[in-house]
Image (cartoon, grey):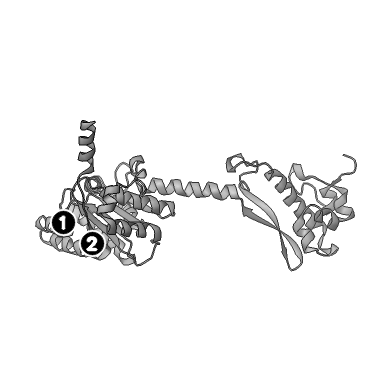
Amino acid sequence: MSGMVRIGELVGKNSFFSERAKYLDPGMLDNPKAYWEARFPELREANLPASAYTPSTSLRLMNVWYDRKKCEGCTGYQSCPKNDDVKGHVFSIGIVDGMIIEQVNSCHFYRQHMEKELENRLWVFSGLNDGHRRMTFENFPREQKKLNKELCRRAWYFAQNYVPGADMKGLYIYGAYGTAKTHLACAMLNQLIARRLKVLYVQAERTFAALSDLYFREHRDGLPTRSEILDKYISADVLVIDELGHENVNDASIWALYTILNGREPQRKPVIITSNFSPMDLAERYLERAAGETSRRAEALISRLYWLTDDYEMHGEDYRSRKYLKNLDS
């Protein structure tokens, strides 16, 4: 190793960096300004005085140079050769008041990785299954677009423009079976996830049955409590409740829906409802099955439902039946 100088000899202490960074080229000592400007175009452009290139500065620059070499030929975050504490990060040079400093920023691959991780977490949180994830605006039934132009425009506008905290109502979409209400609601959620919003899909019958069941096994077997589950429904930026009105309407389900809507109302967090019942029919359904305190709560949740949503009727025929009959004819 003739012609090489240990860093420890330069700064007066051994093992200053890792094993790979023990030696310095003599050129750093003879003319550090020329040496580093030849390696870093940004330093050449800055044209700092020779006095800026102190021994400690050379150590910092060597660290940046060595790190930059590690990044050459990198194909992605998973293949990053750096240690865990700096994996996915790159060192760069900054100049502050004529002094050269070392900076650390996340690299392009790391940002891609974190973006994908965020997307995966949003999908998991959303409750959307593979079938729901295939329901998009692009493959929404063409005949339904023609029959429900205003509703489709409203759904598209919401999915493209809603941001948390915006004063924008959700949608109450009602109509007959098989008119693609769920498809439209899921298309909105898929677009919102693409925009990195935190959304949640729940199916009314299963959700309220599960919440009622939890009443009898609260704090048992390590299961989440009703409060913890309801907090999840309340915290989502946008909540879809699918097939509302088909749940077993009782005190427990009315209490749960009231709690969800009441929790979302202060921040005007929108809710998207699909149902076979019009808002008026749904109100009658709740009120006729409630009594006493539950009746007053049912009235309150209906008021909140009107406050949080604009209602649209989905027109059209049952596309499942049409598809079935078409298959029989073919």
The answer to whether residue 230 shows anywhere in this view is no
Q: Amino acid at mark 2?
A: Leu
Position in image of residue 251 (x %, y %): 16, 54
Asked which secondary structure carries label 1, the reply is helix
Position in image of residue 51 (x %, y %): 84, 64
| Whether residue 139 is situated above or below residue 103 in the rendered picture | above
Characterize the local packing of mark 2: few (<14), some (14-19) or many (20 or more) Cα atoms within 10 angstroms: many
Q: Nearer the viewer, residue 180 or 283?
A: 180
Q: Amino acid at mark 1?
A: Leu
Determine the image quadrant of residue 312.
Answer: bottom left
The answer to whether residue 89 shows anywhere in this view is yes
Q: Is 316 left, or right, of 236 in this rendering?
A: left
Q: Nearer the viewer, residue 322 or 275?
A: 322
Residue at 85% over, 49% down? 9
Residue with the mark numbered 2 = 305
Q: Is 147 left, or right, of 160 in this rendering?
A: left
Question: Marks 2/1: CA distance?
Answer: 11 Å
Residue with the mark numbered 1 = 282
Characterize the local packing of mark 1: few (<14), some (14-19) or many (20 or more) Cα atoms within 10 angstroms: some
Asked which secondary structure carries label 2, the reply is helix
Quadrant of the rendering where the C terminus is positioned: top left
Quadrant of the rendering where the N terminus is positioned: top right
Position in image of residue 325 (x %, y %): 20, 35
Determine the image quadrant of residue 236.
Answer: bottom left
Is the C-beta separation of discs 2 and 1 under 8 Å? yes
In primary-sequence order, the first of circles 2 and 1 is 1
Q: How many marks?
A: 2
Residue at 27% over, 53% down? 146
Residue at 17% over, 56% down? 278
Q: Nearer the viewer, residue 296 or 154?
A: 154
Residue at 30% over, 51% down? 185
